[in-house]
Image: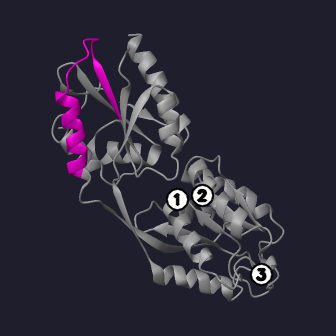
């Protein structure tokens, strides 16, 4: 029986189940997880968000309302927001007066995280943008959707800005598009609030090295070339990954990273942000960039790549 292709997922494995683990196991891969990121929540900023809710700053029927909705582009931001909501013992955040509060999100994973929170604690909120796939698409979606809403103004007839819950490392593409001067009356104000910080886990490079070395020196099964895939979910940690693969000075020729005779490593990214980071900062072009940020997007891209490579 042919050995399963190892696929190294540079993320923390979700519990109690992980969609990537289930998907790639069923597709005859051997998924392996290496956590890359360590997150620290900004309790003071999250407390500020809680105070805004409790003061009625997002209440639909409050003429002094300050914000018309929230934007999320990462699961960590959703996690921080969820902690804040779950600490709302008085239930003020889940008040009926929050009806139709729009929550904008990008990608199915972030949407799923929000959905469970909305179902349990925010029954009057609505989720939008889950299929947009990246920040630029989400921004254009928000322009069309938010500007069409009747309740997007305060008592003075002024369009309400949106709260954008972010990490300290983020692109500014969404605020730039929404607040572009050329939009005039269609522009939407954005207030960014940093709710978490991200850094590389100290153990990441060592853990990554151990797996690559194990792959490099393991016995061959005699069935020709062996392939391993590495999937990157964030620009953070890319320098360590490339260093371990020996790409600090030599560039991949597009046919995989040859780590040992007959053993190649290919790289896939969850989306264009990480792909562009690799290209611009390290002059490295990943072999696959998912068309949609999901396990199906990664899996489909890998499948098409390998079919094209084997058809050479």
- Residue at point 70% right, 56% down? 128
Task: Give residue 215's quadrant in the image.
Answer: top left
Spatial CA span between label 2 and label 1 = 7 Å
Q: Position of residue 52 (x, y in %)?
A: 63, 84
Q: Are marks 2 and 1 in contact (CB under 8 Å)?
A: yes
Which of the two labelled residues, at mark 2 and mark 1, occupies the earlier sequence position? 1
Magenta highlight range: 205-229
Residue 226 lies within the magenta run: yes
Q: Dot 3 lies on which element?
A: loop
Q: Dot 2 lies on which element?
A: helix
For residue 154, which numbered disc appears in the image? 3
Q: Tell me the quarter of the image containing the N terminus.
A: top left
- The residue where tag 1 is placed is 75
Q: Of circles 3 and 1, which is in front? A: 1
- Residue at point 50% right, 53% down? 15
- The residue where tag 2 is placed is 113
Spatial CA span between label 3 and label 1 = 29 Å
């Amino acid at each position: 029986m042919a050995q399963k292709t190892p696929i190294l997922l540079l993320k923390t494995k979700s519990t109690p189940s992980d969609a990537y683990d289930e998907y790639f196991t069923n597709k005859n891969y051997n998924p392996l997880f290496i956590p890359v990121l360590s997150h620290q929540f900004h309790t003071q900023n999250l407390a500020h968000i809680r105070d805004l809710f409790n003061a009625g700053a997002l209440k639909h029927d409050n003429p002094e309302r300050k914000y018309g909705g929230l934007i999320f582009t990462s699961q960590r931001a959703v996690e921080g927001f969820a902690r804040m909501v779950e600490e709302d013992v008085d239930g003020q955040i889940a008040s009926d007066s929050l009806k139709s509060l729009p929550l904008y999100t990008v990608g199915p994973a972030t949407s799923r995280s929000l959905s469970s929170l909305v179902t349990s604690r925010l029954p009057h909120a609505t989720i939008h943008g889950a299929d947009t796939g990246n920040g630029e698409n989400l921004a254009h979606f928000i322009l069309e959707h938010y500007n069409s809403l009747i309740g997007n103004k305060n008592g003075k007839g002024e369009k309400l800005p949106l709260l954008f819950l972010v990490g300290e490392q983020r692109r500014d593409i969404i605020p730039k598009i929404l607040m572009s001067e050329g939009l005039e009356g269609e522009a939407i104000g954005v207030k960014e609030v940093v709710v978490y910080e991200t850094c590389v886990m100290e153990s990441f490079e060592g853990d990554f090295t151990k797996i690559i070395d194990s792959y490099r020196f393991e016995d061959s099964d005699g069935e020709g070339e062996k392939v391993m895939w590495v999937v990157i979910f964030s620009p953070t940690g890319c320098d360590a990954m490339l260093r371990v693969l020996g790409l600090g000075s030599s560039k991949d020729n597009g046919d995989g990273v040859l780590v040992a005779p007959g053993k190649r490593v290919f790289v896939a990214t969850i989306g264009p942000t990480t792909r562009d980071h690799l290209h611009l900062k390290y002059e490295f072009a990943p072999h696959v960039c998912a068309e949609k940020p999901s396990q199906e997007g990664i899996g489909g891209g890998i499948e098409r790549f390998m079919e094209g490579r084997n058809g050479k």
